Image (tube, rainbow, N blue to C red):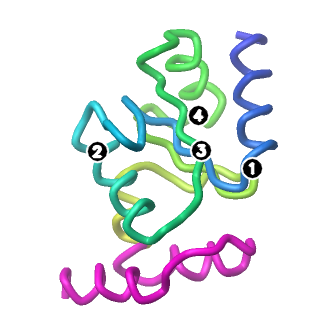
Amino acid sequence: MTDATTQIKEQITANDVVLFMKGTKEMPQCGFSSRVAGVLNYMGVDFSDVNVLADETIRQGIKEFSDWPTIPQLYVKGEFVGGCDIITEMTISGELDTLLEENGVTFDKDAADKIREANA
């Protein structure tokens, strides 16, 4: 698992925002990954996507690395944030905005507000 751990650490260190997901941000391969990638894309967040379906060692390795059993997994500035349900809740509550702002990650505040309005 050392190789996977090294690759994961490199990804989350080299990129401000990383989404370990099934598929890619342009073509998600599961509903949960699609939801999180969709939120990030809609909000204009510049993020790196890692397709866990392309590498079984990364797919298993990320679960062990984060001690989180499901995918997708979002990292901001090297810190694990959560999976689909957590990101959805954080988006609707405004916590995701705060997290991104505190970490200097650029995003479209109007788009984030529109998501909240649509889910009110």
> Pointer 4: what residue?
67
The residue at 59%/82% (across/down) is 98
- Residue 99 part of the magenta segment: yes
Marks 1,4: beta carbons within 8 A: no
> Pointer 2: what residue?
32
> Pointer 1: what residue?
78
Indicate the quadrant containing the C terminus: top left, top right, bottom left or bottom right. bottom left
In the image, what residue type sits under mark 2?
Answer: Phe
Indicate the quadrant containing the N terminus: top left, top right, bottom left or bottom right. top right
Classify 63 as above or below 56: below
In the image, what residue type sits under mark 4?
Answer: Asp
**Residue 68 location (% of width, % of height):** 51, 37
Separation of marks 3 and 1 at Cα, in angstroms = 12 Å
> Pointer 3: what residue?
48
In the image, what residue type sits under mark 3?
Answer: Ser
Separation of marks 4 and 2 at Cα, in angstroms = 18 Å
What segment carries the magenta color?
91-120
N-terminal-most mark, 1 or 4: 4
Mark 3 or 1, which is nearer the eye? 3
How many residues crowd mark 1 within 10 Å: few (<14), some (14–19), many (20+)?
Answer: some
Mark 3 or 4, which is nearer the eye? 3
The residue tagged with tag 1: helix, strand or loop?
loop
Q: Is residue 3 left or right of residue 85?
A: right
Q: Is residue 33 left or right of residue 30?
A: right
The residue tagged with tag 2: helix, strand or loop?
helix
**Residue 35 location (% of width, % of height):** 29, 53
